[in-house]
Each structure stands twice: as C-alpha cells, then as structure tokens.
Image (spheres, helix red, strand yellow):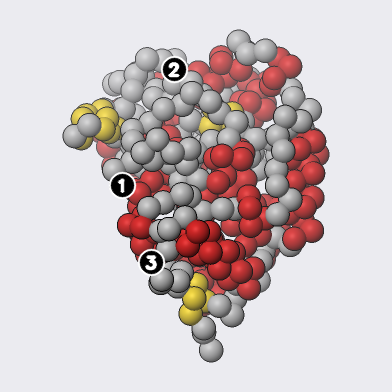
C-alpha cells in the first residue's frame, strides 16, 4: 500500500493538507512536526510578499519532513497530489472552502482536508454539495483546513446553513452544461472556445485598478467585502490577476456572463439565472439585458488599446452574440471618447 503507516490522502486532498495531518498524527515518525501557526517560507519580492508553494513542491517533502517510509517517492506524491485541471492560484489566494466537506471529514473521525478543487481560478462552488465556497480569514498556514473548520464553528450557524438550494442546483447544472458543451467540440473548436471564454472570464473579473471597482462580475455579484490585495501593476495585469483575487460569487457570475456571450448558455438560461440570483439576493437587482450587465470596464484611449490587444481576435463564425456585444461596447467607447477607430478583433474562419 502506497501510504502504509500514514494517513490515507483524501480523493481530492492537497499535499500541504496531508502533510499537516501527518505531522499531528502521533503514530507517524517525522523529523519535523508542523504547528498550527507554521507557514510556508515567505519573502519580499519588491513590494509584494511571495510564498513557497507546499502543494506542488514534491521534491522537498521527503527530505524536509523525514517521513520514515521508503515507499513514499516523488512519483507516488505526484500521482496522488498533482493538480490535473484548472489554473492554480498562488498559495495566498487558496482561501475558499466548503464547510460541508470539512464537517463531513470531522464526522468520520478525521481531521478536515483541504481540497484541490478549491484552489483554481475557476473555483466557485463545491462540486459535491453545490454550495458557494466561503472565505477563510487567514489562509497562510499549513493548518488552513482545521482553521477553516474552527472558523465555521465560531460563525453564526444560520449563515452556514443558509437555504440557497435553488441557486445551488442552478450552479451545479450550469457547470455541467458548460463542461458537456466543451467536451462535444473538436480539439480545434475547443481551443477557440476555451481561449475566448478565459479572456472574457478574466475581463469580467478584472481586479480593481486605479480606484475603479473592477470588472462587471465584481460589480454585480461580489459578496465578499473588505478583502485587500496588492494593486495591479498595469491594466493588463489587473485582468491577469483578477480571477485569482475574486470571490467565488463573482467567479460564478463571470462564468455565466462569459458562457452566455460565447453561446454556451442560452438567453433563456441567463434570464433564469437573473431570477434565481435575485431570489437568493433580495437586495440585488440585475439588468435583464445581458449586454448591460456584461459591460467592459471604463478605460481611457490607451486602456482601450490594451483591452483590445488582451482580448485578441474573435472568430466571427463561432460567436454571433459576442460579435454584437463587441459592437455595442465599441459604440459606448466612442461616446466616451476613447474609441480609436480600430474595432475589436473580428476574424472570419473558413
């Protein structure tokens, strides 16, 4: 057995989570036991605090922790703990979790486990329970799974058990529809759709820049308040880091907007989403017009050029809804005096 004498890794557990569980297990022989206050190595890179990544640094695990198990090798660790899908966010941004998953671990008599599916730019809801992920206040420690469970225990139970079953089902079915749609495409078509989808997803999740509120998904769907991160270095950088710093609610909203514009989500399903969202968020009022909700950010003339370059070419044949949306954005930018006469990249593909 690969992990003889050690805690068995969860099906979707991260390496750092498993290491912490090994450290606190009195039956495991190790030269270094992690404490609840231990963090990965950190250093300053200019004005930004960087951190080592214990979830992917497989080579240093055995020598650092001195696990007395000759059968644990690099290949075994990669087989169980490597990330297989999604764009991994930095360690400091892996702060969202599902309370139900943690509670189920504890009910089984185990320490809670941090899941790999919570660690990507696309992570918005639990793949098992369908509920929106919640934020851990301080996710810098190896013990983040335990810290998150304690945080839940100290939180108002009515908030943890918020009845959002309709919205949860909608999230689960929508995600399944997007995956099914993409899987039906040819390799060439899939590459085109995924590329445009990811660009739109990042634009709608743009990190706040120069006093702005960020992308459209943050403006309309953000539920987390008060979280602060280093300012983006440029407009393009604000698009690049946007998905990493966005909260799960904004991520799901951006997923809906991007999927609607590229034709994966139908107009009727978008209308259904508006009704379900407002039912779950009575104080929120969304425009019924997709093109109003999915407005591109306010920019100056140079910013328009950056945005146009970042989006890149859009194959006209594949995206009629997006083509209309880009035309509407160009007209808006013309009214605002920033349109330079060059349209967003529409390219016909034979």
In this view, 208 is above or below 150 = below
- Residue at label 2? 24
Q: CA distance from mark 3 to mark 1?
A: 20 Å
Callout 3 secondary element: loop
Circle 3 residues within 10 Å: few <14, some 14–19, many ≥20: few
Q: Are marks 3 and 1 in contact (CB under 8 Å)?
A: no
Density class for disc 1 (Cα within 10 Å; few <14, some 14-19, many ≥20) is few
Mark 2 → mark 3, Cα distance in angstroms: 61 Å
Most distant residue in the top direction = 154
Q: Which disc number belongs to residue 234?
A: 1
Labelled disc at residue 340: 3
Frontmost of labels 3 and 1 is: 3
Whichever of labels 1 and 2 marks the residue nearer the N terminus, that label is 2
Label 2–label 3 contact, CB within 8 A: no
Disc 2 element: helix
Q: Residues within 10 Å of mark 2 (few under 14, many from 20)?
A: some
Q: Position of residue 26 (x, y in %)?
A: 44, 15
First-in-chain label (3 vs 1): 1
User: Can see residue 10?
Assistant: no
Element under label 1? loop
**Residue positioned 55% across, 68% down in the render:** 327
Mark whose residue sits in front, 1 or 2: 1
């Amino acid at each position: 057995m690969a992990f003889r004498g050690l805690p068995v890794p969860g099906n979707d557990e991260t390496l750092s989570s498993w290491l912490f569980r090994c450290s606190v297990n009195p039956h495991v022989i190790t030269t270094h036991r992690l404490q609840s206050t231990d963090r990965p190595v950190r250093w300053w890179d200019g004005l930004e605090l960087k951190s080592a990544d214990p979830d992917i640094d497989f080579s240093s695990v055995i020598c650092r922790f001195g696990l007395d198990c000759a059968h644990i090798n690099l290949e075994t660790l990669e087989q169980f703990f490597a990330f297989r899908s999604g764009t991994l966010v930095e360690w400091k941004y892996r702060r969202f979790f599902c309370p139900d998953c943690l509670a189920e671990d504890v009910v089984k008599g185990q320490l809670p486990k941090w899941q790999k599916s919570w660690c990507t730019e696309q992570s918005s809801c639990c793949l098992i329970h369908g509920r929106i992920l919640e934020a851990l206040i301080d996710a810098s420690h190896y013990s983040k799974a335990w810290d998150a469970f304690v945080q839940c225990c100290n939180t108002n139970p009515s908030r943890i058990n918020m009845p959002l079953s309709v919205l949860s089902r909608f999230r689960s079915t929508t995600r399944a529809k997007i995956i099914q749609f993409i899987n039906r495409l040819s390799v060439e078509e899939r590459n085109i759709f995924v590329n445009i989808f990811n660009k739109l997803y990042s634009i709608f999740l743009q990190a706040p820049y120069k006093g702005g509120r960020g992308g459209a998904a943050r403006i309309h769907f953000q539920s987390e308040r008060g979280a602060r991160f280093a300012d983006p270095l440029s407009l393009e950088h604000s698009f690049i880091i946007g998905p990493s710093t966005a909260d799960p609610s904004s991520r799901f909203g951006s997923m809906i907007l991007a999927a609607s514009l590229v034709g994966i989500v139908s107009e009727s399903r978008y209308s259904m989403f508006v009704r379900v969202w407002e039912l779950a968020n009575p104080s929120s009022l969304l425009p019924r017009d997709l093109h109003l909700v999915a407005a591109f950010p306010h920019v100056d003339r140079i910013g328009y050029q950056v945005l146009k370059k970042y989006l890149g070419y859009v194959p006209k044949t594949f995206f009629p809804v997006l083509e209309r949306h880009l035309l509407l954005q160009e007209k808006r930018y013309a009214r605002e005096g920033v349109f330079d006469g060059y349209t967003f990249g529409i390219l016909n593909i034979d």
